[in-house]
Image (cartoon, rainbow, N blue to C red):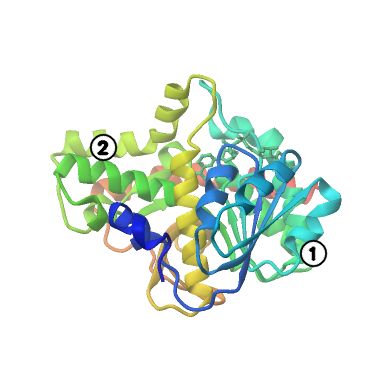
Amino acid sequence: KQFLRPSTVNNLTKLVRNFSVTGQNNYKVAVLGASGGIGQPMSLLLKQTPAIKQLALYDIAHTPGVAADLSHIDTAAQVSGHIGAEQLGDCLTGSDVVVIPAGVPRKPGMTRDDLFNTNASIVADLSKACAKYCPTAFICIISNPVNSTVPICCEIYKKSGVSDTSKIFGVTTLDVVRSNAFIAEAKGFDVSKVNVPVIGGHAGITIIPVISQCSPSCSFEQPALEAITERIQDAGTEVVKAKAGAGSATLSMAYAGARFAASALDALSGKDNVVECAFIQSSITAATYFSTPLLLGPNGVKKNFGLGNLSDYEKKLVDACVPELQKSIKKGEEFAANFH
Ligand code: NAI
């Protein structure tokens, strides 16, 4: 099945490759924060995904307009708009996949953790509703700080009596997408064939591109390796600075979020070999949440591929990442413990 119409396929083979979803054509996908900088373009991409039968858009503002606009596109997905907390239940009921880009983005000079005070309660409220209305759906959390919002969601699920958190994912796909783009550019590779696993978390030094496992294989002199690793770690900040107060990455994140959602649908439909990196509850390192390449299946994570063989440099990056992650995880868990 193709993601876009045949006439546009030639120019957009990369999109087709990434978003092709096999199997059933009757999934419901909800987007929470659908009117935002990420939410709108991501919903546009999802509207073009053939496996989606219903696209339910939720926000605290502007969803009637966004839904009306998208509903005029001649693709199969039926679009519904839901606004305000009293319409959240309708949006979520029956959802197979929920993608969450709700919350405030960074401005220049801010870290992702600076968003904690606002976004933690937004994610906690939305998680509580997901646990109530669609406890078995794939939950894909984009809202930052991902290193804390994912633990918040898992803890809220447990508090709500939903013990299975194996379908709760922090979306780190943008780090993979950026790594693929930067390495292809540096090495002159065909970008559509590049795949770099990114492990750890989704903030600063917790973002660890595993360039030694890049496919096709490639190598850099140590200074160049450090420079490209740091560029990947700071890529979000590169966009925040370039946008100069108008927000953070939205278009590339929309692409990455739609790719992860399409993989979740592929996994649900029983497709083989669906592999994505994502930030999940994990026992791979001393940090209780960690991103690694995952084989996805209908029930969530089918297999965790772990760290694989790391270079000495990458091992050092993991050593620096773990305590940093532990702090963010603890902050999220403590917030959730006190949340009512
Ligand atoms: P934005 O401000 O443009 O949009 C956020 C949307 O969330 C708005 O439409 C707002 O009305 C909505 N919202 C606020 N409170 C809500 C609630 N309680 N329920 C539902 N919707 C609510 O922000 P943008 O640029 O779309 O970014 C969204 C989030 O994604 C930010 O936290 C940002 O840091 C994060 N992000 C994550 C990335 C990742 O790689 N995981 C990459 C880029 C951004």
Q: Nearer the viewer, residue 147 or 321?
A: 147
Label 1 CA crowd tier, 10 Å (few <14, some 14–19, many 20+): some
Whether residue 288 is visible: no
Quick check: 242 left or right of 308?
right
* Quadrant assignment for ligand 1: top right
Label 2 CA crowd tier, 10 Å (few <14, some 14–19, many 20+): some
Q: Residue at x 52, y 60 (%)?
A: 261
The image position of residue 196, as x and y in percent, is: 29, 54
The image position of residue 267, as x and y in percent, is: 49, 73
Q: How many marks?
A: 2
Q: Residue at x 80, y 47 (%)?
A: 339
The quarter of the picture where the N terminus appears is bottom left
Q: Nearer the viewer, residue 210 or 16?
A: 16
Q: Nearer the viewer, residue 274 or 62?
A: 62
CB-based contact (under 8 Å), mark 1 and mark 2: no
Classify 14 as above or below 300: above
The image position of residue 165, as x and y in percent, is: 64, 66
Quick check: 155 left or right of 23?
right
- Which residue is the site of mark 1? 132
- Which residue is the site of mark 2? 228
> What is the C-alpha distance between the residues marked 1 and 2?
43 Å
Q: Assign a secondary structure to mark 1.
A: helix
